[in-house]
Structures are given as C-alpha cells and as structure tokens.
Image (spheres, rainbow, N blue to C red):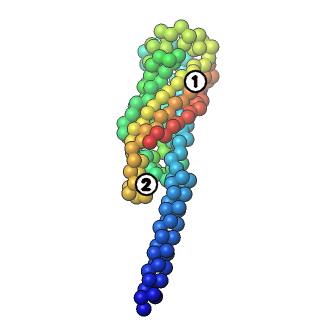
Amino acid sequence: MVATSKSTLRVCCISATIIVLVTIAVLVTLALTVFKPRDPDVVLYPVGLSKLQVDDFISQDSVTSEMVMSIRNRNYASFEFANATSHIKYDGKLVGRVPIVQGTVPSRSAFNITAPAVLRAKRLRENPNAINDIVGGSLNLTATVTMHGKMSMLNRLIKKRGSVYTECHMTIYISEVPIRGESWCWAKLDM
C-alpha cells in the first residue's frame, strides 16, 4: 500500500511540474509575441486647408485649420491618454499649437482625433525663409506631440503607464487651389 501511494504521489508531482512548465512556456511565448507592445500607426490629415487662401497667411495674425489625427492601435491593450498639446514648428521655431482632448484608443482598432490647429501666421512672416516658402508655394512644418496615459489589457486586469511620442512632417501646398497638404508621421510607444 505504501509503494502505490509513493508512486501516485510521484506521478502527481511530475504531472503538476509538467503543467506548470507548459503554462510558463505558453505565457512567455504570448508575452514575447502576441502581447508585445507595438508602435501605433499615426496619420495626420490637414482637412481644413481647403477653406484657406494665400492671403490668409500674409494678412492675418493667426490662421485656424481643422486637423484630423488618425491613430491605429495594433496592440491587444487599449490606450487611455490625457489632454495634450501638439506643437507645430517651422524651421525649429514654434508657430502653432493643436489642443488634443483626452480619449481612449481601443485595442486593435483605429481612433480619430479632430482638433483645430492654430498657426501663428505673424510668427511665420517674421522668418525670412517662410516668406520665400510662401511665395514659392509650399510650406514645410513639423508637428510633435507626447501623449501620456495608461494601457490596459485583459478587461483592465493588467494596467501599465506609457507614453506615445509622435512626430509628423507636413507640407502645405499654398499655391494650389484649393490649398492642400500631405504628411508622413512616425510614432514611438514608450512603456
């Protein structure tokens, strides 16, 4: 009787050890592949430019245009971010701001943020390079934003703080009617 209980105990211990090792291997594999944090895809659409004219950049102190930032979250965690401000620079100098209202980017989906971009045309005109670019028909701007927030996964069971750093380079074609723009962006998730 003692021999069978020892062998039964040995089988149970070996089985439990195997189950624990397989579970650890599955969790490590998931953490390194599926749940690995990925950088979001960000696209900036300067949608309100068609309402502007070249004279607005020359005669007004500030120009307001609607911007849409599309964020595609490729992670299995949602990202809830606080209010932020995007800074628009020309030639390294601040020429505008875009207020970004807090929100949540759901996991494995896209999220659009619409906000007014206020360009200080007066600051642009103070830069001699900007005058040449405006006369030349295009304006190259850089927009940067850091969004701080928290990521939550598995129905808010796992939470972690993080930040998304985004930099977008925009070209505004002022000489075209209507005025249009294009951009290319990169974003980095830091946890």
Numbered label tally: 2
Residue 103 in view (yes/no): no
- Circle 1 packing at 10 Å, graded few (<14), some (14-19), many (20+), is some
**Label 1 sits on residue:** 172
Q: Which residue lies furthest to the front in this view?
A: 3
Residue 153: numbered disc: 2
Q: Residue furthest bottom?
A: 1
Gap between marks 1 and 2 measured at Cα: 39 Å
Q: Is residue 102 left or right of residue 185?
A: left
Looking at the rendered structure, the kind of residue marked 1 is Ile
In the rendered view of the protein, which quadrant contains the N terminus? Answer: bottom left
- Pinpoint residue 111: horizontal percent, then vertical percent: 48, 45
- In this view, the residue in front, 121 or 110, is 110
Residue 4 in view (yes/no): yes
- In this view, the residue in front, 47 or 34, is 34
- Residue at point 56%, 26% (across, down): 170
- Residue at point 54%, 52% (across, down): 32
Residue 6 sits in which quadrant?
A: bottom left
Residue 163 sits in which quadrant?
A: top left
Q: Is residue 167 above or below residue 149?
A: above
- Pinpoint residue 25: horizontal percent, then vertical percent: 53, 61
Q: In this view, does 11 lie above or below 70?
A: below
- Residue at point 49%, 62% (across, down): 24
Local secondary structure at mark 1: strand
Instruction: Nearest to the eye among marks 1 and 2: give it.
Output: 2
